[in-house]
Amino acid sequence: MIAPLRRLYHGRIYYGWWVAAAASGISFANAATAIGILSVFVIPMSQEFGWNRTEMAGATSLGAILGAALAPFSGRLIDRCGARLILAAGGCIVIVGCLYLATAQALLGFYIAFTAIRIADQGLIQVGASVTAGKWFLRYRGRATGLVLFGGSGGIIVLAPLVQLAITHWDWRAAWGLLAVVMLCVGLIPAALIIRRQPEDLGLAIDGAPVPTPSSSSPDLRNDDRPAPLRAVIRTPQFWLILASLFLVSIATSGIGLHLVPHLSQQGLTPTAAVAAVSIMSIAGALGALALGVIAERIPPRLLLITVYLAGAAGIWALMRADDLPKTYLFAILQGLAGSGVNTLAPIMWASYYGRRTLGSIFGISRAAQVAGFALGPLGSAIVFDRTGTYQGAFLTLAIAAIAAAALLTTARRPRLTQWPQLIQ
């Protein structure tokens, strides 16, 4: 396998596109860890074991918190060694976790296994896959990042109905086994074989073109070549404003996923229609990731992020009134655009603001803030439901959080290059 790979390094197709494809593949398989997929398992597993929603949501929150603690360290490791090791380790953990879930007999076993795969998801795979495109691309960074995130949304599109089909015809244990096989074949093997740290390590120029000159008139090119040490980045107010906005919007987007199928069933929709909403949300997210990635090469990603934040708030408002298919699918489209939009645009914006040299470290901290929000969202919604029997109060709070995130981001303008000398000192 080594010789064919070496031929790809200097082939007619820029090797960065193969790297992006491998990162997209592991993002596809990583849908096994998504709350939207776990939502399909909530009813059959809770019926068999008698677990309530708060107990199941607790595992997602615990894994998210531990993943958040790991993300800054994995981000720094990516800057130094590349994403291949991080992604391979994450893929192995997901495979083992899914196989263990297929044999789960008690709540403790569920917590151990699902916590482990959520740590791998949030602390390893999400960080590694998102940063990979930013390391290999500059001019085409938007569309490459969109391709990687398209894989993640595409995974839910394909795997959600497959999981439901496996549960219907076999049982939920077989469905977990299926997810392990997908991660092995589509995620782990391609990532371990193809992904490398950055083009310079292979004697390649970024984007497969001549290295830009320092006198380039493009602000993006100059900002990418200018070193932005992490100690300088964290001294800019924009960094903290973006971080806070990502934390709030992550609460808003994650507070629904685990509870979507149960909420829609409570609203009178059939389980099949509820799962179809998950698929529509993923289709909208996949198409949105590709479109937003391309658009972000022409329009500032900050403005696009503000738009998707507000789209998420509007989607939650629609969900609160969703008692038929049109309202449900309107929510699914808006929520899909919001979720994939945040994941696609956040790494693009970080690279645009601070360059790619410490992108892994920056995104690791950013991912920790997002994951902290992911931990609070589903758990908060579960607590409200268990106490009130409805999700309405929780969803209203989530919509307000998304609007607050948009307000914060409006003040986070791109740092000036003239700031760096003073900040580095």
Image (spheres, rainbow, N blue to C red):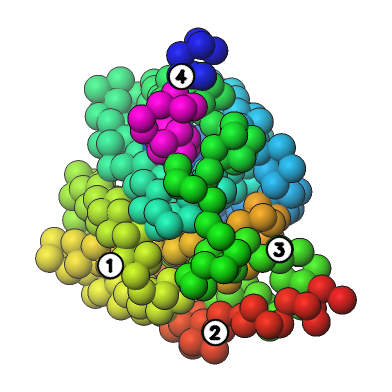
Q: CA distance from mark 4 to mark 3?
A: 32 Å
The percent position of residue 232, horizontal first and vertical second, equals 77, 72
Q: Identify the secondary structure beneath mark 2.
A: loop
Hey, what amino acid is under mark 3?
A: Pro
The residue at the point 54 percent across, 51 percent down is 211
The residue at the point 64 percent across, 78 percent down is 417
| Observer able to see residue 312 | no
Q: Identify the secondary structure beneath mark 4.
A: helix
Q: CA distance from mark 1 to mark 2?
A: 25 Å
Q: CA distance from mark 2 to mark 3?
A: 19 Å
- Asked whether disc 4 touches disc 3, contact meaning CB atoms under 8 Å apart, the reply is no
Which numbered disc flags the more N-terminal residue, 4 or 1?
A: 4
Which numbered disc flags the more N-terminal residue, 2 or 3?
A: 3
Q: Which mark is in front, 2 or 3?
A: 3
Name the residue carrying label 1. Answer: 334
Q: CA distance from mark 4 to mark 1?
A: 43 Å
Hey, what amino acid is under mark 4?
A: Arg
